[in-house]
């Protein structure tokens, strides 16, 4: 008994010391990192040695210095007084994430600004952080398995021009209790708010009960879930009768929902799924009244471009407005750190398969969380697949044009390297040349990782071009200057060509707007009419 008492006292002393010295909060390998100046915002978090829990929030103090675009930010605030404080105050903080927490040495956080400490009855308040608009729910993503540190932001930038809502994120460098923890991404969460998904709170009757809700396709964990009445299917449509699709209630929180509201939103999901399950190719699609087809296409293209192993089945966030605003479900892109060739499991590294058909591989490995049957059914629809091909062509002529997507990667890389942020992060977390779960490619340094990412993207885009019938050498009708857009500048270029016969910078195949085999003044007329809203035909 005496030995047990001594052991318990020793363990208590060790726990007290660990908390006081911050051992419990997963410090980096190298804590002696010198940050003098950076182009990234600097975030200080002070928990005074407390353990940051994964589920229960604790009070912390946070200070963010950001002097603006193009300006440097200095860690020594005494030597550099007068810097711009973007936010200073209390926050309620906890660890967040599933595999991003359990499989990563570098841990992500969720935080909510507070009006005062939790111990004094503090409540969350809305704050505009780094120009992303006022809200009270934020995340600090901790790129670790993604050694490029850009896959999430790359997915956001690819999706932003096309989807109704895509989260914003900003690179920053983080200190916790005075220790440098590396580069993080301070980002919006997928939540309800004026500057997020602008949804009305659901009411109790009539139109008000029909919105707004945020749900998520995800695994069964500590969250309350609703289980679908329909099973996932193989890539040939065969049902996996022992597997299930689960939904989590994200907003409002489950405990804040009435039974009537739960019944409504789960019933609406049932209706959507039934319409998809009953769909037969070449029948008039009934599912269009339940889901925003263009939005689902944009979501699919984002998932497939990244060949994301978590696509569709995990972090599958979707929302619904009130029927009087829009009765259809819409998806939101989130959680792409294992995409773009980063995963060595479930063939995530491949560039030449469709991820929506990957249930066979995952089921064979015994994974209980499979891809909902929605995507199999949608891709049997000639109307849907035709629209998918058209949308891919629009992507490829705009921000997914070869030079533009590579410029996006280069721009993100420059932000990370121009003032040493990536180098400091790599000193704190030295992982180059080492396999970190679930890396497929083990890069020797940052430039090697960026090179791999760009090569992977090149191969993936080329494969999708072939599958979706896009010829990258072809120009969109009316895109006379070849910039990927059809606008008034194309009229100017076309008129100048007709006046001078100088074909420099003129794409004559795209200039034949009336498709008569020649470029004349009638093409100018056809182009102007198109810009005024008439169809080409």
Image (spheres, rainbow, N blue to C red):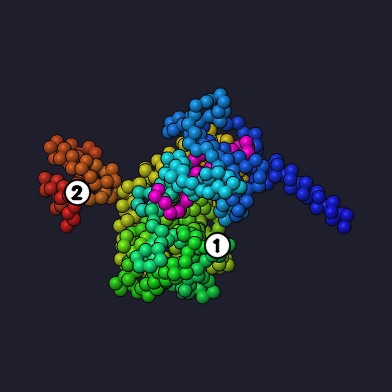
SS for dot 1: loop
Residue closest to the far front: 120
Residue closest to the far left: 521
Specify the quadrant of the image occupied by residue 202. bottom left
Q: In this view, does 423 lie above or below 217?
A: above
User: Where residue 436 appears, x then y in whole percent?
Assistant: 60, 49
Q: Is residue 23 above or below residue 38?
A: below
- The residue under label 1 is 223
User: Which portion, as a residue range, is magenta?
Assistant: 171-195
In front of the other: 165 or 410 = 165
Select label 2 or label 1 by which is in front. 1
User: Where residue 192 appears, x then y in whole percent?
Assistant: 43, 54
The residue sitting at 65% across, 34% down in the picture is 32
User: Can residue 299 be seen at all in this image of the molecule?
Assistant: no
The residue sitting at 40% across, 53% down in the picture is 197
Disc assigned to residue 531 = 2
Q: Is residue 315 above or below residue 377?
A: above
User: Where residue 97 appears, x then y in whole percent?
Assistant: 56, 53
Q: If you read the primary sequence from the N terminus, does the residue marked by circle 2 or circle 1 appear first? A: 1
């Amino acid at each position: 008994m005496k030995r047990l008492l001594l052991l318990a006292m020793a363990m208590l002393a060790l726990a007290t010391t660990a908390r006081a010295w911050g051992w419990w909060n997963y410090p980096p390998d190298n804590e002696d990192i010198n940050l003098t100046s950076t182009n990234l915002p600097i975030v200080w978090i002070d928990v005074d040695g407390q353990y940051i829990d994964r589920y229960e929030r604790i009070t912390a103090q946070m200070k963010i210095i950001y002097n603006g675009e193009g300006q440097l930010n200095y860690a020594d605030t005494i030597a550099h007084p007068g810097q711009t404080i973007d936010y200073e105050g209390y926050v309620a903080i906890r660890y967040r994430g599933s595999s991003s927490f359990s499989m990563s040495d570098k841990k992500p956080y969720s935080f909510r600004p507070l009006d005062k400490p939790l111990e004094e009855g503090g409540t969350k308040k809305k704050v505009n952080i780094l120009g992303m608009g006022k809200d009270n729910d934020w995340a600090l993503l901790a790129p670790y398995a993604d050694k490029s540190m850009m896959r999430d932001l790359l997915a956001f930038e690819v999706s932003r021009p096309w989807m109704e809502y895509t989260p914003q994120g900003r690179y920053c460098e983080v200190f916790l209790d005075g220790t440098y923890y590396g580069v993080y991404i301070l980002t919006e969460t997928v939540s309800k708010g004026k500057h997020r998904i602008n949804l009305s709170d659901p009411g109790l009757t009539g139109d008000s009960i029909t919105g707004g809700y945020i749900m998520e396709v995800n695994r069964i964990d500590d969250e309350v879930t609703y289980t679908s009445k329909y099973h996932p299917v193989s890539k040939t449509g065969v049902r996996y009768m022992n597997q299930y699709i689960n939904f989590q209630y994200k907003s409002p929180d489950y405990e804040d929902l009435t039974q009537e509201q739960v019944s409504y939103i789960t019933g609406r999901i049932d209706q959507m799924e039934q319409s998809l399950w009953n769909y037969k190719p070449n029948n008039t699609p009934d599912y269009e009244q339940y889901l925003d087809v263009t939005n689902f296409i944009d979501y699919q293209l984002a998932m497939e471009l990244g060949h994301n192993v978590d696509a569709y089945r995990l972090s599958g966030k979707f929302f619904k407005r009130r029927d009087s605003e829009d009765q259809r479900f819409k998806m939101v892109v989130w959680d792409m750190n294992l995409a773009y060739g980063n995963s060595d499991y479930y063939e995530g590294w491949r560039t030449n398969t469709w991820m929506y058909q990957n249930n066979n591989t995952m089921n064979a490995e015994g994974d209980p969380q499979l891809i909902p049957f929605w995507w199999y059914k949608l891709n049997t629809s000639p109307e849907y697949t035709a629209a998918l091909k058209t949308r891919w062509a629009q992507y490829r002529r705009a921000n997914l044009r070869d030079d533009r997507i590579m410029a996006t990667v280069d721009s993100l890389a420059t932000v990370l390297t121009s003032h040493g942020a990536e180098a400091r992060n790599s000193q704190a977390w030295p992982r180059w040349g080492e396999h970190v779960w679930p890396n497929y490619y083990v890069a020797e340094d940052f430039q090697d990782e960026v090179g791999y990412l760009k090569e992977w993207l090149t191969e993936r885009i080329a494969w999708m071009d072939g599958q979706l019938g896009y010829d990258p050498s072809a120009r969109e009708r009316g895109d006379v200057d070849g910039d990927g857009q059809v606008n008034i500048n194309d009229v100017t270029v076309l008129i100048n060509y007709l006046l001078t016969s100088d074909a420099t910078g003129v794409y004559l195949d795209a200039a034949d707007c009336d498709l008569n085999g020649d470029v004349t003044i009638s093409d100018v007329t056809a182009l102007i009419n198109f810009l005024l809203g008439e169809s080409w035909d």
